[in-house]
Every structure is written in structure tokens, then in C-alpha cells.
Amino acid sequence: MNFFDSMQTSASGLTAQRLRMNLVSSNLANTNTTRTEQGGPYQRREPIFAAIPVQSAFGEILNSELGGGPAEVNVVDVINDSRKPIQKFDPQHPDADSLGFVSMPNINVMEEMVNMMTASRSYEANVSAISTSKNMVQKALEIGR
């Protein structure tokens, strides 16, 4: 694994965690959205991550197939949560059904805050890894002087 592979791995982690934080923010912003363009209440969204081998040359492809190569994080999909909406009795609400119930998004604010903190910590860890890699290269260059 060389300097550029470590930077690429950390950069892909930064991108993935930034998307995750954006999705959590969207989930939190729509906790009371009862009507969307698709119809029905807002559905919580979350990313699906996968480790994809970093491949550019034949030797790197061979190395990754043997299990020793570096990998980067990619978002392979963004899925809607399959939990059913919460039924809230509010006959005065414009989206209430004939029985007076409104379908509300099934978003747990505490769960979303934990997801946001986890994404933030992962983002910070990737920034730290990039900084450490940069410092190691600088020290290696200083040895050569």
C-alpha cells in the first residue's frame, strides 16, 4: 500500500460519511413531513456502503484478488427504510384519513442523532488518517535531506 492508496481510501471514506450526514440531516428535517411527491409520508433514507478494491494496474488487481490490496468505501445504494408509518390521531390535519388518522414518518430522532455522531466521528477519523499519511511523507522527505 502506498501513500496515494491510503489517501484514496481515506478520501472515499470522507465522501461516504458526508453523504451519510446529508441523509441524516434530511431525515431529521422531514420528521413531520406527511406528504411527499411520491405520495404518503416521508420515508427515512440510509446509505449502503461497500468496500471496493482500489485497482489501477495488473499487479494491484492481482494483489486485491489475493486479499492483500487496499480498498475504498463506495456508496452502492441509498435505500428507503421499510418501517411502517406512525398513525397519529389528528382529525383536523389536512392529510388525515376518513378515520382521522395521519400517517407520520417513522423517524426516531435519537437514532438519527446517534447516526449523525457516528458519521461525524468516522469523518474525523478519515481526516486524521489523511493528516497522518501526509506527516509520514513529510518526515520521509526530511530524512532524504
Image (cartoon, rainbow, N blue to C red):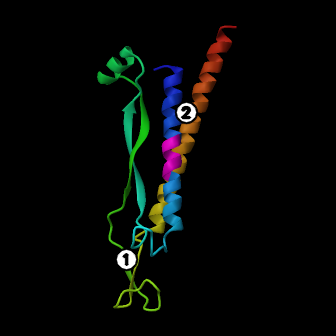
Label 1 neighbourhood size at 10 Å, few (<14), some (14-19), many (20+)?
some
Q: Which mark is residue 86?
A: 1
Image: 130 above or below 58 = below
Q: Quadrant of residue 51?
A: top left
Which secondary structure, mark 2?
A: helix
Q: Main secondary structure of the magenta part?
A: helix
Q: Nearer the viewer, mark 2 or mark 1?
A: 1
Q: Nearer the viewer, residue 66 or 81?
A: 81
Q: Kindly identify the amino acid type of the residue bearing the numbered disc 2.
A: Ala
Q: Classify the position of the N terminus by image quarter.
A: top left
**Residue at far right of view:** 145
Label 2 neighbourhood size at 10 Å, few (<14), some (14-19), many (20+)?
some
Q: Classify the position of the C terminus by image quarter.
A: top right
Tell me, yes or no, whether the two marked residues, 2 and 1, touch with CB atoms within 8 Å.
no
Q: Nearer the viewer, residue 46 or 122?
A: 46
Percent position of residue 55, x then y: 40, 24
Badge 2 is on which residue? 129
Region of the chain picked out in magenta, as a range: 15-20
Q: Residue at (36%, 62%) from the top-left corner?
A: 81
Q: Nearer the viewer, residue 53 or 114?
A: 53
Which secondary structure, mark 1?
A: strand
